[in-house]
Amino acid sequence: MKKVIFSVGGSILFKEGDVNLQVVNDLKEFLEKTKGKYKVGIVVGGGKYARIYINFAKKLGLPTLVQHAIATELTQLHAKLLAYALNIEEYFCKIFEEAEVMFERKGYFVLGGVVPGYTTDWDAAVMAERVKADILVNITNVKGVYDKNPDIYPDAKFLEELDWKTFYKIFESEGVEFKPGMNFVFDPRAAKICENAGIPVFIMKYDKIKDLYDYLEGKKKIVGTLIK
C-alpha cells in the first residue's frame, strides 16, 4: 500500500482570511479515491495566524520558546479543524508517536506542529521518515521551484525536477533565514531528512490536488517540482 505524507501550510488552508474550501474538498476527494489503496498522513501548519500570535506573544514580552509553543498549539487547532472537515477526526494526533501508531494501524493521521520552533515541513519530514513514506507532497501557493526568485527575476526558470544538491544551492542563493514561516518553498532541514531517508518530495500548488491521484498512479502529468 502506497504511503503519502502531505505538508499543508496554514496559509493554504486559510487563504485570504477564509477557509480554502477548494483545498478541503480536493483533499476529501483524494482520500475517497485512495481509500484502501494508500495510507495518508497530513501535517498542517499555522500560516499567517501563527505569525500573528507569535507577534502578540513578542509584544507581551514572552520568551521566544513560549512564542513558538503558542504557535505550535495553533497548528494543532488547524489540524483538528481539518480532520473534522475531512470526516477523519478520530485520526487527529498531537505527537509523532501517536501519529505513527495511528498511521500503521488505521492508515491515516492528521497532525499539527509538534516541536516548537520547527516548520510544518520539518514535522512532515519526520513523520515521512518514521513511516517510511513513498513520497512527501508539499502543498503550496506556488507551482514549484525556480532556479531563482521569480518575484525578483523575470527570467527565472521553472524546474520540473532537480536533485538535492541543486535544491540546497538555490536556497543558499536566496539568503533565507531558517525559521518557522520562512519565505521559501520547502524547509532545507526537512529536505535533509527526506534526502537521507531516500524519500522524494513533490512540491505543487494547491489547485492541482484534484489531479494528484492520477499523477501518483502515473496516469497524468501535473505542474510541480519533484526533488529526489
Image (cartoon, rainbow, N blue to C red):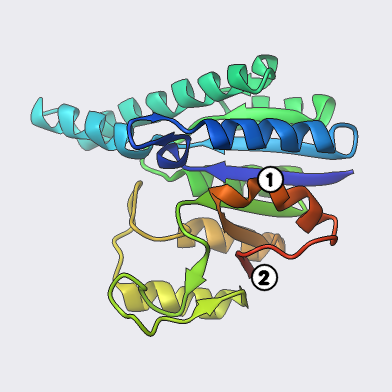
Q: Can you name the residue that lies furthest to the bottom here?
A: 155
Instruction: Specify which label sits upstream in the sequence, 2 or 1.
Output: 1
Q: Is residue 135 above or below residue 69?
A: below
Q: In this view, does 87 lie above or below 71?
A: above
Query: Residue sitting at 33 percent across and 31 percent down?
Result: 17
The location of residue 185, given as percent across then percent down, is: 45, 60
Residue 66: mark? none
The location of residue 116, given as percent across then percent down, is: 38, 36
Measure how far apart labels 2 and 1 are at the Cα level: 23 Å
Q: Tell me, yes or no, if residue 132 can be seen here.
A: no
Label 1 Cα neighbours within 10 Å, binned few <14 / some 14-19 / many ≥20:
some
The location of residue 35, given as percent across then percent down, is: 85, 32
The location of residue 223, given as percent across then percent down, is: 62, 65
Amino acid at pointer 2: Lys
| Residue situated in front as seen by the camera: 17 or 56 | 17
Amino acid at pointer 1: Lys
Q: Tell me, yes or no, if residue 181 can be seen here.
A: yes
Q: Would residue 122 appear left or right of 126 to someone viewing this image?
A: left
**Residue 115 sits in quarter:** top left
Residue 228: mark? 2
Label 2 Cα neighbours within 10 Å, binned few <14 / some 14-19 / many ≥20:
some
**Residue 164 sits in quarter:** bottom right
Which element carries disc 1, helix, strand or loop? helix
Which element carries disc 2, helix, strand or loop? loop
Query: Residue sitting at 36 percent across and 41 percent down?
Result: 117
Q: Would residue 143 appear left or right of 148 to someone viewing this image?
A: right
Q: In this view, does 215 lie above or below 181?
A: below
Per the image, the residue denoted by label 1 is 210
Q: In this view, does 27 lie above or below 204?
A: above
**Residue 220 sits in quarter:** bottom right
Q: How many labels does the image show?
A: 2
